[in-house]
Amino acid sequence: MVQDSFKPVVVWLILNGKTEEALSLLAKNYAVNVPRLKVGLPKGHKIKALGCYTAKHETIAVLNSDVLSNPFVVIHEFYHHLRSKAVDKMRRGTEKNADRFALSFLQEYQAAVKKAQNIT
Ligand SMILES: [Zn+2]
C-alpha cells in the first residue's frame, strides 16, 4: 500500500465498522501483534472512559458498539498497544501522545477527503 494512503484507509475502515481490519492493518504496519478487540469495558473501570487497553491480554476494550466505529478512540488505544512492549516505562507514552497519534490519522483522513473533493 502507498504510505500516503495508510492513515486515511485506517480511519475509513473504522468509520465503516471494519475495525478488526483496521487493527490488522495497523499491526502489520507497525510490526506488532494484532490486538484483541472487545465490546464492554472491564469491571471497575471509570464509567466515563470510552475505551481502555489491557496490556496483559493485549486487548482493546470499547464502551459499546458505537465506539467501535470511533477512529479517535480505537487509534488512541492502539497507541497504548504499540507502546506496551517498550522496555522502560518512560518510553511507554502518555495520554497526550496517544491523542496526538490518533489525531494525526484523523488529520490525514480529512486532508485526503478534501483532496478528493477538489478533484471532482
Ligand atoms: Zn489512553
Image: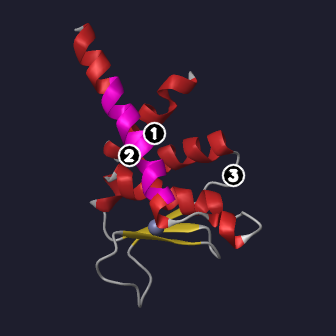
Query: Which amino acid lies under the numbered mark 1 shown in the image of this protein?
Result: Val
User: What residue range appears in magenta?
Assistant: 97-112
- Cβ of disc 1 within 8 Å of ligand 1? no
Confirm whether the magenta stretch covers residue 110: yes
User: Which quadrant would the C terminus be assigned to in this image?
Assistant: top left
Q: Residue at x 50, y 44 (%)?
A: 21
Q: Residue at x 45, y 61 (%)?
A: 96
Q: Are marks 3 and 1 in contact (CB under 8 Å)?
A: no
Q: Quadrant of residue 42?
A: bottom left
Outermost residue to the bottom? 44
Q: Are marks 2 and 3 in contact (CB under 8 Å)?
A: no
Query: Which amino acid lies under the numbered mark 3 shown in the image of this protein?
Result: Val
Judging by the rendered image, the residue that carries numbered circle 2 is 14
Work out whether mark 2 precedes mark 3 in sequence or the reverse, and give the earlier one: 2
Task: Please name the predominant secondary structure of the magenta segment in the image.
Answer: helix
Q: Is residue 9 visible?
A: yes
Give 73 or 15, whichever is nearer the viewer. Answer: 73
Q: Residue at x 30, y 82 (%)?
A: 47
Confirm whether the magenta stretch covers residue 83: no
Q: Position of residue 80 (x, y in %)?
A: 56, 63
Query: Which amino acid lies under the numbered mark 2 shown in the image of this protein?
Result: Ile
The image shows a total of numbered marks equal to: 3
- Numbered mark located on residue 10 in the image: 1
Apparent side of residue 66 relative to residue 51 in the rendered image (left or right): left
Judging by the rendered image, the residue that carries numbered circle 3 is 32
Q: Position of residue 112 (x, y in %)?
A: 35, 24
SS at mark 2 in the image: helix
Q: Is residue 38 visible?
A: no
